[in-house]
Amino acid sequence: MGSNAIQAALIFFYVAYLVATVQGVEVNVKTSGAKGDGDCDDTAAFKKAWDEVCKATEPSTLKVPEGKYMLGQIGFLGPCKSAVTFDAAEGAKFIAPTDLSQFKTKDGWILFSMIKDFTLSGGTYNGQGSAAWKINKCKENMNAPLCKNLPINMNLGTLTNSVVKGIKSVDSKFFHMNVIQCKNLTLNKIKIRAPADSANTDGIHIGRSEGVTVDDAEIKTGDDCISFGDGAKKVTIENVKCGPGHGIAIGSLGRYPNEQPVEDVCIKNCKLTNTMFGVRIKTWPASPEGVATGMHFEDLKMVNVSTPILIDQQYCPWNQCKAGVPSKVKISDVSFKDIKGTSATKVAVKLLCSPGVPCEKVEMSGVNLEYHGTNGSAISECCNVKPTLSGKNVPPICDDVKASA
């Protein structure tokens, strides 16, 4: 080979090296052995592909083409050496095992954890939950293994400066998405679906996380469309369509000792249709001390929603509590503004605050909730709260506030 040819070859390989360095690694799961045929177990192939992109020193992408991928319980774990994108085609479908014995840990079906600058995009995640709903024991005992150990479809833990977009979650065995210990996480264009009678299939649960945004989601499920656990801070929920389901809930809070405060939550520009509740804050009676403050609900549309506005400090599902003992979770700085539509129940607004720590700084403005039942117009019920009212509110809010002993 002549000197010019050698020089040209060296230049070619050097340029190729520079391109690879700048672009990082792109790994197609099929080159890692995934079949995507709806029959073979592709778990090992996904783990192999993930390990390769996670160790890359430049931003890298795991590509998932169209197909039906059978995945067992799997963790996509960091820390990674650079930014990683998990990019699934629109026609990529992930299928969970139906056999609960295949879930060996409490991490859920699919876990993404300890990753910075992460993007998760596309694909449908099918939890095949119908068999699990039939054996769910939460109504009998919330601490039963067939309640607390049922797998979540997608566990998002300790993600920082990350984005989850354009994904669908279907028929989870338990919660669809669990956001825990994340910071600066955006969820965009999310679709979640499960039957209205599927037990404990909360759409998106957010706890012990800061700087979370949910924007543009459509959630139809058997429990809360979006729920908040303790430690949720600086969270914005907007442009969400919810229903069927149990509405959007802050809580339940106060079930466990040493819960972290809930602070600065904004829920706006959402539509709830045919849900069991609208927006609510719920705390357990006989709770340890806790704090929930800076919670704002605005520009919400209710369509045939039961109890569209609710503060419930007597929350006691399936009588698994010490009813009658006041909650010690302090609720303050709450606003309900421009919430309009129709209530499926005569009591459209219910503010049941704790006699131990009454609610403070509750504001109501521009509420207009109509009830079209045969037993009169909509009413409100209030206890241990004196809200600040402005503008016209329908129904009249807290005309006769009760104080419990």
Image (spheres, rainbow, N blue to C red):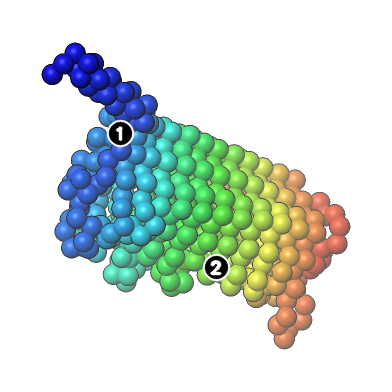
Residue under circle 1?
25
Residue type at mark 2: give it.
Answer: Gly
Q: Is residue 88 left or right of residue 358?
A: left
| Residue drawn at x 25%, y 20% as measured from the top left | 8
Marks 2 and 1 sit apart, C-alpha to C-alpha, by 41 Å
The crowd level at tag 1 (other Cα within 10 Å; few <14, some 14-19, many 20+) is: many
Q: Is residue 53 above or below residue 86?
A: above
Residue under numbered circle 2: 243
Quarter holding residue 144: bottom left
Which image quadrant: the N terminus?
top left
Mark 1 secondary-structure assignment: loop
Considering only vertical position in the picture, is 380 above or below 183?
A: below
N-terminal of the pair, mark 2 or mark 1, is 1
Q: Residue at x 75, y 55 (%)?
A: 337
Residue 36 point in image, percent of width and height: 23, 57
**Placement of 150 over or under 22, stated as above or below:** below
In what quadrant of the picture does the C terminus appear? Answer: bottom right
Secondary structure of residue under mark 2: loop
Q: Nearer the viewer, residue 250 or 238?
A: 238
Q: Nearer the viewer, residue 224 or 170?
A: 170
Which mark is nearer the camera, 2 or 1?
1
* CA neighbours of label 2 inside 10 A, class few (<14), some (14 to 19), many (20+): many
